Image (spheres, grey):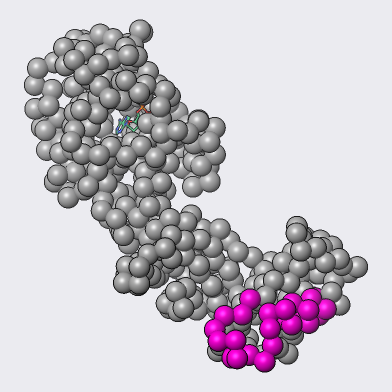
Amino acid sequence: MIPPGADTVLVRHADVGVKSGKVQTEMERRLRDNVAALLDDRGVDAEVERRWSRLLVHADESSVDAATDAAADAFGVQSASAALVVPPEEDAIVDALARTAREYAATDAAGDTFAVDARRAGEPEAHPFTSKDLENEGGAAVFAELDDPEVDLDDPDATFFVECREDEAFVFTEQRAGPGGLPLGSQGKVVALVSGGIDSPVAAWEMMKRGAPLVPVYLELGDYGGPDHEARAMETVRRLADYAPNFEMAVRRVPAGDVMALLDEEVGPARMLVYRRFMYRVAEHVARETNAAGIVTGEAVGQKSSQTTRNLAATSVATDLPIHRPLLSMDKPEITERARRIGTFRDSTIPAGCNRIAPDFPETNATPGIVDEAQPEGLYDRAREAAANATLVEL
Ligand code: ATP
Ligand code: MG
C-alpha cells in the first residue's frame, strides 16, 4: 500500500555512497540519467532530481507506483519508496501518518502489528521536535486508526516511515528493493557471451549490476544450435536490455557452425575445451573492436566438465583479457532463483547447444598442453574471421 496522495519517489543508492565526493557526484548524475531513461521507456511522465545524495522522482498520484518500480529497477539503487510529501511540521506529519493508517486499515492486507520509524535529517535546531517525538505522536495517531492494533518494533506487519528534512517531510510505507550495485555506465564495457541457457544472462546481469554495460555476443552453432536456441538467446538479451533503455544492446551474432562441425569431426575428449578457447578468442576480438575491457560468461566451477578448475585454466589461456565469472561459486538452484527474479528464466529453459557436441567421455583434467595438442591448426585464425563476420542483431 502507498500513502494516499503520494506523488514522489525517494530513491536511495547503494554502493555509490562509499565513493569519494567527486566520484559520487558523477555516479549520482549517471544514476539520475538512467532512472530518467527507465521512466521514459515505460511511458511514466516524471522528473528526476538529485538531492541530499538521494534522488527524488517527482511524479503524480496516478504514476507514482510505476515510477517507484522503474526506479527500483535501476542498477545502483538500494531501495525506492513512494512517499507523501508534507511540510516539516509535527502536526502535518502526524496527520499524514493518520491518513495513511486509515487507508491501510481499509485494505485486505492489514495486519494487527505496526511500528512508526521516524528519522530527522539536517541541523538539530531545524525542528522543535525530535524523531522520538514523531514516533510517539505518530504512533498514537496510527494506533487510533487501526482495528485493535499492537505495537511491534521487531517484526511489525506494517511500518509507517517518516523522513523529516529541513524543508519537507516524507511519509512512506514501503522500501522496494532495488538491485543494489553501481549505476550502469560507471564501469568499462564487457563482452557478454550469451548462450540462451539459464546461466549466461544471470552472469551478464551481475556485471550490469556492478556498472558495466554489455556487448552481447552469440555464437551461432549451425546444425549444433538451432533457431529455438538462438531465439532464446535474443529473448534473454531483450530482457536485459529492458534494464538499460539508454544503452546500445544489439547482439553480435557470430557464425560458428563450421568450426563446430570441424571440432565434432577432428577433436576427441578435449573437444569442448577447444571450443571454449575458440569462443574466448572470438570474444577477445569483439572486445578489441568495441573497446570492451573484459569478457563475462555464465561458467561456475564444476557445473560442466569444461568448467572444472583445471579445464578453466587450460582454456582461459586463449585470451589475455580478464574473463569475469560472477556465477563461479553458485549452485544451479541459486542461479535459477536469480534468473526468475530478473525475468530471464522463462526464456532460457532449454539446454544450450553445447550438449549436442559434447564427447561421450570428456576430458575433465586437462592441461594447457593437452588442449594445444588437440587444437586444430588455424583455430585462432578462424576465430578472428568469425568475429569479423559477425552480424548485428537489433533487438
Ligand atoms: P548457460 O550457461 O547460459 O546456461 P550452458 O550452461 O549450457 O548455458 P555452457 O554451454 O556450459 O553453458 O557454456 C558456458 C558459458 O559459455 C555460457 O554461460 C555462456 O557464457 C558461454 N556460451 C555457451 N554457448 C554459447 C553460445 N552459443 N554463444 C555465446 N556464448 C556461449
Ligand atoms: Mg552453464
Task: Left or right? Give the position of 66 relative to 183.
Answer: right
Q: Is residue 39 magenta?
A: no
Q: Report which quarter residue 10 is drawn in.
A: bottom right
Quarter of the N terminus within the rendering:
bottom right
Whether residue 251 can be seen here: no
Total numbered circles: 0
Could you say where residue 376 lies in the image, as x and y percent from the top left? Answer: 13, 15
| Residue at the spot 18% in from the left edge and 22% down from the top edge | 258
Q: Residue furthest front?
A: 124
Q: Which residues are magenta?
A: 119-142
Q: Is residue 137 magenta?
A: yes
Image-based side of 132 in relation to 368, left or right: right
Camera-side residue of 361 and 320: 320
- Give coordinates of residue 321: x percent, y percent: 21, 39
Q: Is residue 82 above or below residue 335?
A: below
Image x and y of residue 57, in percent? 49, 75
Which is nearer the eye, 262 or 324?
324
Q: Quadrant of residue 27?
A: bottom left
Residue at 51% across, 61% down? 78
Q: Nearer the viewer, residue 155 or 291?
A: 155
Q: Name the residue: 60% across, 64% down.
A: 175
Please name the residue shown 54% across and 73% down the image: 9
- Give residue 269's position: percent from left, percent from top: 28, 9
Say left or right for 11 vs 188.
right
Q: Main secondary structure of the magenta part?
A: helix
Do we see residue 175 in this rendering? yes
Task: Look at the picture and state if 304 lies above or below 28.
Answer: above
